[in-house]
Amino acid sequence: MQDLIRQLLTELGENPDREGLARTPLRVEKALRFLTSGYHADLHEVLNNALFTVDYSEMVIVKDIDFYSLCEHHLLPFFGKCHVAYIPNSRVIGLSKIPRIVDVFARRLQIQERMTNEIAQTILQAIDPRGVAVVCEGTHLCMSMRGVEKQNSFAVTSAMLGIFRDNARTRMEFLELIKLRTGVISPSSETASLACVND
Ligand SMILES: [Zn+2]
């Protein structure tokens, strides 16, 4: 990988041998391996010993989970907050594991829509709850660094499964509790993170 980074620097018109860049290929490789480490994460290991049977049927919410990911179209970062909720059906996940599940899917080349769905599906399969809701709010550098009009844009994506999809009151209760920056989840905002494909 370091040879490729050296070559990339040359293609960009740089001198990869100058002092400031001498160790850059090594650093870039280390950074990229960390930022894509989700490919090698073992979900069973993450969830191991963290699934419990309980007599609890109220909504469980973990909000404001920071995520950092890389847009698969430009290899540029997108990052923001992820909010996760579920209503148990006799089984729960240890709360500290929810951010780890987010990391497993964020540390890959991603689109925000797929990441949101993968987080929701993982929880669904792990504990078979009555419903799962995941909302992610992300700033995409591939949009905000290129083009003046898009500097403050961010994308909101959601996955609503089970009772969160079927019952508007449950869904509203969740959305009220997480208080989105935008206040709404609209179909147009859900397509925002795919907009970068076109340029
Ligand atoms: Zn992009």
Image (cartoon, grey):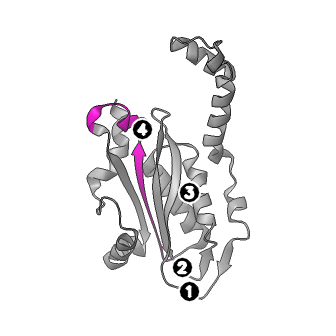
Camera-near label (4 vs 3) is: 4
Camera-near label (3 vs 2) is: 3
- Residue that sits furthest to the front in the current view: 19
Which residue in the protein does label 4 denote?
141
Q: Reading the chain from its start, which is encountered first: label 3 or label 2?
A: 2
Amino acid type, mark 3: Val
Which residue in the protein does label 3 denote?
102
| Secondary element at tag 2 | loop
- Asked if the magenta segment contains residue 143, the reply would be yes
Q: Which mark is drawn over residue 6? A: none
As displayed, is residue 4 above or below residue 40? above
Q: Reading the chain from its start, which is encountered first: label 4 or label 3?
A: 3
The residues tagged by marks 1 and 4 sit, at their Cα atoms, a distance apart of 41 Å
Q: Reading the chain from its start, which is encountered first: label 1 or label 3?
A: 1
The residues tagged by marks 4 and 2 sit, at their Cα atoms, a distance apart of 36 Å
| Secondary element at tag 1 | loop
Tell me whether circle 1 and circle 2 mark residues in contact (CB < 8 Å).
yes
